[in-house]
Amino acid sequence: MIRIKLFLFIIALSFSTHAQNIQDTAKKDQQNINEALLLKDQQQQKIDSLVKIQLKNELQSAAGNSKKTTELENKLRQIAISDSLRKIHQLEKIQVLKKNAKGYPVILNTDTLFYIYVRTGSFNAMERADAISKKVEKLYEDPFYKADSLVISPNEDSYDLVYKNNDILMSVANLDGLWFAKSNEALAKEYLQTIKQSIDAERKANSLVNWLKRIGLVLLIIVLLTVIISIINFLFKRTASFLSSKRESYLNVLKIKNIKIFTPEHFEKALLRLNNIIRIAVIILIIYLSLPLLFSIFPETEAWTGTLLGWILSPMKAALNAVAHYLPNLFTVIVIYLIFKYAIRGIKYFFYEIKLGEIQLRGFHADWAIPTFNILKFVLYAFMLILIFPYLPGSGSPAFQGVSVFLGILISLGSSSAITNIVAGLVITYMRPFRIGDRVKIGDVTGDVLEKTMLVTRIKTIKNEDITVPNSMVLSSSTINYSSHTKKESQGLIVHQTLTLGYDIPYKDIYDMLTRAALKTEYILEDPKPFVLQTSLDDFYISYQINAYTKEANKQAAIYSKMFENIQNEFNAAGIEIMSPHYRATRDGSAPAMPHAIK
């Protein structure tokens, strides 16, 4: 299918090219036909001129013969009418030719003297222009050239420019005069004056004295250029020395709060490199701008002056025009940015007041304020970019749109997991399963929450280990928050421990001892009072669970350790052994399996 389409495209292109060639050939043929008709009219005009002379002679000889005189006058009148109509037709054909005609320059060295548009005899316009250019150049190179020897010689129907009465430079015929709407004599004089002035100017410009002057100017420009480059090098060398001497002052410049972005040595190196790049750029620019000045001195290279300047001025002009045309769009972008900037400031103030508790909304928690503001800020900035995008320079170009689509594809393909974590972070924010500083257990990780971001949650364990948990994992795992009931309005977290004791010990005594041990533990609350639960009646022992309230969920390890110490002390002082490992109640005389009471 692709080959067929390619084949059809080639055929269509061939037909199009062929049709264009046919059209160009038709235009050229029509132009040749019009020129031939004009030449035919010129020949007929010559014949009519001869006939008119003959009729005038016959009219003089027929004096007294009224009939013949009237006949001859009618013939002369008909010839005059034909000449008028022919001239009108010639002007119409000239106007048609001017629409598609191409002028060919007559050149001396690099200067264009005038243009040739019409043919003469068997020579077309291009051949005429080339022949005239060669003859003018021959005159310019003639060491014995005299301007007075170049004169105009009239012929029957044209005017010739002749040098020394034998060398014809060119002929100015009726078609030339008709083309410029001038008489042949006036146009010939104009061409003669132009040729003389150009030859004199070129011979004078290329004289030995002028060449010596030009060489002197070149040497002077080179010397001045050398001096200017030396001054530039000196100034930039002083700038480099100044930068090196002020290196230590960069410490305060390159700080954001208390963070050093670069060391003074790095910044010095960067500034010195930038200084050197600017120096080289300035020198290159000075040398480049001096080239048009040098080229303008010599006629052979003078044409390059405008070209070299155009290479710099054209881009600068285009850039300035682009900036000027972009100013309305720039003002629109600035207005849109300022509107969104101050709108975001107002929204920020509103949500920070909610965070501080100055503004209260029913059902909206204070810790939702900053995340909600961040979401709104992102949405507003995205909407601002959508509004600004059409006003950016080049936003409508296919290249700009292609790059935008390409970046969008890269972001969508490379950020799928990041987007998942961002969405999970938003859900976690509004679920409020924990806050900064809470003691939590997420999966197998237990510790204090250090940071909540849009992507991850950072947890510090009791062993001072920082663990980074992706928000998607937090959302998909079960989360235990030990700190959620330790606030002022809550009773506190219940710490608990199960131990086994024999059936021979009264449970009320056990309740008292466990309660006393809990109350002796630091960070355990007296109100609500600790309580004991029997969790199972096993074959050899009873399982008792001590439950106590605390407001310090982040110190569970220390609380449990101290409570275990106090339980052991209480039971050892009462002479009660804790049934771990198992012991039977019936004794065979062995000593009790417990340590001596602590005094």
Image (tube, rainbow, N blue to C red):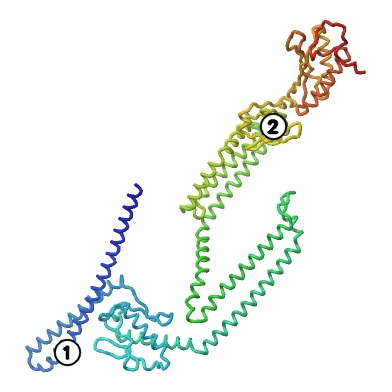
Q: Earlier in the sequence, mark 2 or mark 1?
A: 1
Label annotation for residue 440: none
Q: Using a 10 Å C-alpha cutoff, classify the residue at mark 1 as few (fewer than 14 neighbours), some (14 to 19) or many (20 or more).
A: few
Q: Nearer the viewer, mark 2 or mark 1?
A: 2
| Picture layout, residue 330 above or below residue 115 | above
Q: Residues within 10 Å of mark 2 (few under 14, many from 20)?
A: some
At 27% from the left and 70% from the top, the residue drawn is 28
Q: Residue at x 31, y 61 (%)?
A: 17
Residue at image mark 2? 435
- Please determine whether, in this image, residue 206 is positioned above or below residue 289: below
Q: Quadrant of the C terminus?
A: top right
Residue 454 percent across, percent down from the top left = 63, 37
Indicate whether 198 appears above or below 225: below
**Label 1's element?**
helix
Q: Amino acid at mark 2?
A: Arg
Horizontal side of 75 relative to 494 (left or right) equals left
The x and y percentages for residue 333 are 54, 52
| SS at mark 2 in the image | loop
Residue drawn at x 36%, y 48% is 2
Q: Does the image show residue 472?
A: yes
Question: Which image quadrant for residue 428?
Answer: top right
The residue positioned farthest toward the right in the image shown: 599
Circle 1 is placed at which residue position?
53
**In the rendering, at what x and y percent does residue 338 appear?**
59, 49
Query: Is residue 358 among what the camera can see?
Result: no
The residue under label 1 is which amino acid type? Ile
Location of residue 72 by image quarter? bottom left
